[in-house]
Image (cartoon, rainbow, N blue to C red):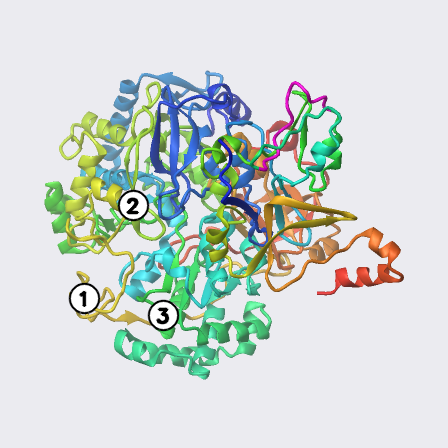
């Protein structure tokens, strides 16, 4: 296909994003709901418990769920207004096919005809070019049941290697580093362990805006006497009142971690017993960090030496601690090394696997944890097994009832899939829960690649920005229209409960996938009649694996307020805290608490390297990107919820007054940021809460307001995460407002 | 049913992260659906991310009611100051201008002053108000004094506020850092205290 079927404005006029506000029964007082459904928020990895008020197959509001242990009724504004995504004017109620003659560029198509067309195109492409010519991109906001089915669909039904997921932009650096250091990829502790620690260390995590409920844990720790250390290029709301703020230059996190470790060694702030008994590799690491003196650390990180020394003293002398990080240290070409640096600091302190001693990465998406465990990653099989491992392949082939020889080999990461479209290796794509045109870096390239596909089918409940390029769009389900499990930030498996039936011709996503399999004549293995049946197969598939769900049932989740994996038998209560002394895991088999044959954790030398594209005379400023609280990811949902749009309507470029003065820029001026890949014109927000060498832009918007048109597609060599957090730009005052200012509403 | 006496409302601006969950949830309250009664503002965004949430403080002697020419603003026996009564309110704005905390809002469409009624539909049934239920930072909290203070070792509650010569005591408590005492700063004291204008200026800028 080539280009969009109609111009952008025509598509927007028909399919949005339009803003929805409460009206009708949603505004009336004293409306008695038919029922309250206990479930969870559809947005981030905190997965707050919430009760949806349902009347006449519509969610009309919410009631706090005070008894759910993680959030106790708390919500952020996204959770409060999430119900407005239902009964939305933009909702897709039928399948669509591309039709430039129709006003919005698409015309409705009968569901069965759409499935026939999809199956026919998959068959044609795979027949002409081979199985791997058809690819799937999936997402970590889906339930674990759906992510399991997507992996099975790729590997068993389509027999393509080419499936990957949007956790590639999110959790993979943390995942890879956790596997290298601990042998397992899960937050090591329940958040309860944060409440009574001496020090809470937060690196590269805008907790207040991206994981709002975690704020209550951090503040409670502070009330109980903890010192809070925040490392970030910006004074985020969580940094505002912390005890020590380290304003790090973007991309220099390993240098800081190595510098802290240097001081821990120098002052003998080490747990020698733990290092001796439970780890390997310390000596090589100690030799490596010898050169990371406070002076050098300060030079590289751009943090005052005094701050580094103070942080090391507090961290070094603490008896208990909790370290958290998020995409701020992970979105780098050395994201894995950054995370390893953080873990080294934790291991050297010996403060892990005990009450009040914690470590965790903060998952971004609803199912950021569960979505990366059961086979939709390009190299993975269910139970956090490896697609390249013969034993793992045999186990899963047995559960699926397929010939192991026919199971494809590992594929490539989500970005590489688009490069394979360019090279002609991939000709067709199915996307679900992924909006790559907004969320991938250097996104003008992504848009061109979507146009180059011979056939592109998108499953979604709204026509997202990528789906505008599709040949066929299939109407999928909102979170509240289906049931299933997700695994939240702490590793707690919880249950999403269905509140509504799908409207119109829309279908639950797993039914759509099974309908395609059936149409292809490969129905075997895709005849589940409920998410519970999928979950029961997933339990068997995960049995004996690292992410062992075999002892988890829907009933147990309800009874216990969630179940932490691993949970290897129905009698097992689950495992809130990993790595406790004497704990058993399927790799160490009793040899020690960590997931290696000897049961010991690994120190990893984490050498410092600068970002892929450092600043220079031509592009002298660092661009870093992130989120705002009222929007979520690519904005497919939140840019359609009126009150959330109003809270932060359009992206702005944050810059320090020192820099603004130099550039002759005033607050609210139209300014242009330009990288080697693209340019964007937005209003300036001049604030003293950001480093003067760095500018910040949130990434939730599409098209001409999309900052990912500027970001760089450089990736970490291990995790393949893109370097969203650093690229080089120049900034200058714009001649006037951009054309879109008159053409588009804020959310469009 | 009155709001149970043992439950109190606490505001701690030092915890506020400016997320506006309270603002968004307030408009889900059944007594004024679609309208938020909370004020949440940046103190000075150019300098800081500090934000302050303001709900009605429910004064013991509510200035809004005292200045109301139509006697439209009533306090219930449990100390909750209610939104103006529709049949009486003449939309004169006196209350909006007089409230020392800047709480009441004039709904010009409805010609009615509206304000936080501490989620009367909820609190009178023993439930928490919407804002204090959802607040993810604990900047707004609702519970018994013993329960809240057990969690807030760093803070002390106050419900006495000084505006010029007016001392106001309120049902709602503000949490202040335990170690610091409240400063009383206003123009009058600077005028009447010889030379203290300069002192006050200095005091404000020392820290």
Does residue A497 belong to the magenta stretch? no
Instruction: Say which residue label 1 marks.
Output: A588
Q: Secondary structure at mark 1?
A: loop
Is residue A398 found left or right of B74 in the rendered image? left
Disc sitting over residue A351 in the figure: 3
Q: CA distance from mark 1 to mark 2?
A: 29 Å
Do labels 3 and 2 touch, CB within 8 Å?
A: no
Do labels 1 and 2 touch, CB within 8 Å?
A: no
- Residue A215 visible within the image: no
Disc 3 packing (10 Å; few <14; some 14–19; many ≥20): many
Disc sitting over residue A561 in the figure: 2
Q: Secondary structure at mark 3?
A: loop
Does residue B80 belong to the magenta stretch? yes
Callout in the foreground (1, 3): 3
* Magenta span: B79-91
Q: Nearer the viewer, residue A495 or A370?
A: A495
Disc 1 packing (10 Å; few <14; some 14–19; many ≥20): some
**Residue at the spot x=68%, y=37% of the render?**
B62
Q: Nearer the viewer, residue A571 or A94?
A: A571
Chain identity of mark 1 = A
Q: CA distance from mark 1 to mark 3?
A: 20 Å
Q: Main secondary structure of the magenta part?
A: loop
């Amino acid at each position: 296909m080539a280009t969009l079927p109609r111009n952008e404005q025509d598509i927007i006029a028909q399919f949005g994003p339009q803003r929805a506000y409460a009206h009708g029964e949603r505004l009336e007082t004293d409306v008695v709901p038919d029922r309250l459904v206990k479930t969870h928020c559809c947005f981030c990895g905190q997965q707050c418990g919430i009760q949806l008020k349902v009347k006449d197959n519509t969610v009309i509001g919410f009631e706090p769920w005070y008894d759910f242990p993680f959030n106790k009724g708390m919500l952020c504004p996204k959770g409060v207004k999430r119900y407005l995504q239902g009964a939305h004017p933009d909702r897709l109620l039928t399948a669509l096919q591309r039709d430039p003659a129709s006003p919005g560029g698409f015309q409705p198509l009968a569901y069965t005809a759409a499935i026939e067309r999809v199956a026919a195109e998959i068959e044609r492409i795979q027949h002409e070019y081979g199985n791997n010519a058809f690819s799937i991109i999936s997402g970590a906001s889906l339930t674990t049941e759906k992510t399991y089915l997507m992996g099975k669909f790729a590997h068993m039904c389509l027999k393509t290697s080419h499936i990957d997921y949007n956790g590639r932009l999110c959790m993979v650096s943390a995942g890879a580093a956790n596997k290298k250091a601990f042998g397992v990829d899960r937050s090591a502790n329940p958040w309860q362990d944060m409440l009574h620690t001496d020090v809470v260390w937060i690196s590269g995590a805008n907790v207040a805006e991206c994981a709002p409920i975690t704020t209550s844990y951090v503040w409670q720790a502070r009330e109980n006497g903890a010192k809070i250390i925040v490392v970030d290029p910006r004074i985020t709301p969580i940094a505002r009142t912390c005890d020590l703020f380290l304003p790090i230059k973007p991309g220099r996190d390993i240098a800081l971690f190595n510098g802290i470790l240097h001081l821990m060694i120098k002052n003998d702030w080490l747990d020698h017993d733990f290092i001796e008994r439970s780890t390997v590799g310390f000596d090589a690491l100690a030799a490596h960090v010898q050169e990371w003196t406070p002076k050098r650390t300060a030079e590289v990180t751009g943090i005052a030496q005094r701050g580094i020394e103070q942080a090391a003293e507090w961290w070094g002398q603490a008896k208990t601690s909790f370290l958290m990080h998020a995409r701020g240290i992970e979105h780098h070409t050395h994201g894995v090394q950054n995370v390893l640096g953080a873990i080294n600091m934790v291991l050297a302190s010996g403060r892990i696997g005990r009450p009040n001693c914690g470590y965790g990465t903060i998952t971004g998406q609803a199912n950021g944890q569960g979505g990366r465990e059961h086979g939709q990653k390009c190299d993975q099989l269910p139970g956090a097994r490896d697609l390249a491992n013969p034993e793992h392949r045999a186990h899963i082939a047995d559960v699926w009832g397929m010939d192991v020889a026919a199971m494809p080999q590992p594929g490539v990461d989500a970005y590489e899939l688009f490069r394979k479209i360019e090279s002609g290796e991939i000709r067709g794509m199915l996307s679900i829960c992924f909006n790559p045109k907004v969320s991938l870096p250097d996104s003008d390239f992504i848009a061109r690649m979507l146009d180059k596909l011979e056939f592109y089918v998108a499953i979604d409940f709204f026509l997202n920005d990528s789906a505008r390029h599709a040949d066929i769009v299939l109407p999928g389900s909102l979170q509240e229209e289906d049931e299933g499990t997700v695994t939240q930030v702490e590793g707690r498996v919880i249950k999403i409960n269905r509140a509504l039936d799908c409207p119109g011709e829309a279908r639950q996503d797993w039914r759509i996938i099974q309908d395609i399999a059936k149409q292809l004549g490969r129905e075997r293995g895709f005849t589940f009649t409920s998410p519970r049946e999928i979950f029961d197969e997933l339990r068997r598939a995960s049995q004996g694996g690292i992410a062992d769900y075999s002892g988890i049932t829907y009933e147990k989740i309800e009874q216990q307020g969630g179940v932490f994996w691993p949970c290897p038998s129905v009698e097992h209560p689950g495992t809130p805290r990993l790595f406790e002394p004497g704990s058993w895991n399927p790799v160490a088999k009793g040899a020690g608490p960590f997931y290696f044959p000897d049961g010991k954790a690994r120190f990893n030398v984490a050498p410092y390297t600068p970002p892929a594209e450092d600043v220079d005379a031509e592009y002298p400023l660092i661009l870093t990107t992130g989120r705002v609280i009222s929007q979520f990811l690519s904005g497919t949902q939140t840019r359609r919820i009126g009150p959330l749009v109003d809270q932060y309507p359009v992206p702005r470029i944050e810059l320090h007054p020192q820099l603004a003065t130099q550039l002759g820029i005033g607050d609210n001026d139209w300014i242009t940021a330009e990288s080697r890949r693209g340019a964007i014109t937005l209003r300036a927000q001049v604030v003293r809460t950001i480093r003067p060498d760095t500018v910040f832009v949130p990434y939730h918007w599409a098209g001409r307001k999309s900052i990912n048109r500027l970001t760089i597609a450089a990736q970490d060599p291990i995790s393949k995460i893109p370097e969203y957090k650093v690229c080089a730009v120049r900034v200058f005052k714009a001649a006037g407002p951009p054309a879109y200012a008159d053409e588009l509403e804020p959310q469009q | 049913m009155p709001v149970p006496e043992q439950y109190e409302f606490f505001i701690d601006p030092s915890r506020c992260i400016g997320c506006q969950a309270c603002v968004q949830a307030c408009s889900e309250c059944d007594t004024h659906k679609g309208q938020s009664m909370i004020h949440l503002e940046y103190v000075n965004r150019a300098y800081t991310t500090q934000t302050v949430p303001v709900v009605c403080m429910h004064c013991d002697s509510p200035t809004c009611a005292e200045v109301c020419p139509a006697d439209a603003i009533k306090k219930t026996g449990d100390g909750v100051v209610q939104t103006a009564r529709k049949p009486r309110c003449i939309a004169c704005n006196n209350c909006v201008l007089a409230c020392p905390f800047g709480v009441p809002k004039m709904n010009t469409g409805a010609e009615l002053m509206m304000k936080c009624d501490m989620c009367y539909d909820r609190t009178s049934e023993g439930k928490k108000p919407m804002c204090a239920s959802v607040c993810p930072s604990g900047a707004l909290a609702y519970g018994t004094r013993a329960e809240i203070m057990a969690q807030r070792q760093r803070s002390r509650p106050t419900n006495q506020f000084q505006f010029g010569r007016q001392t106001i005591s309120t049902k709602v408590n503000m949490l202040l850092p335990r170690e610091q005492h409240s400063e009383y700063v206003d123009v009058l004291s600077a005028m009447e205290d010889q030379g203290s204008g300069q002192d006050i200026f200095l005091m404000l800028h020392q820290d």
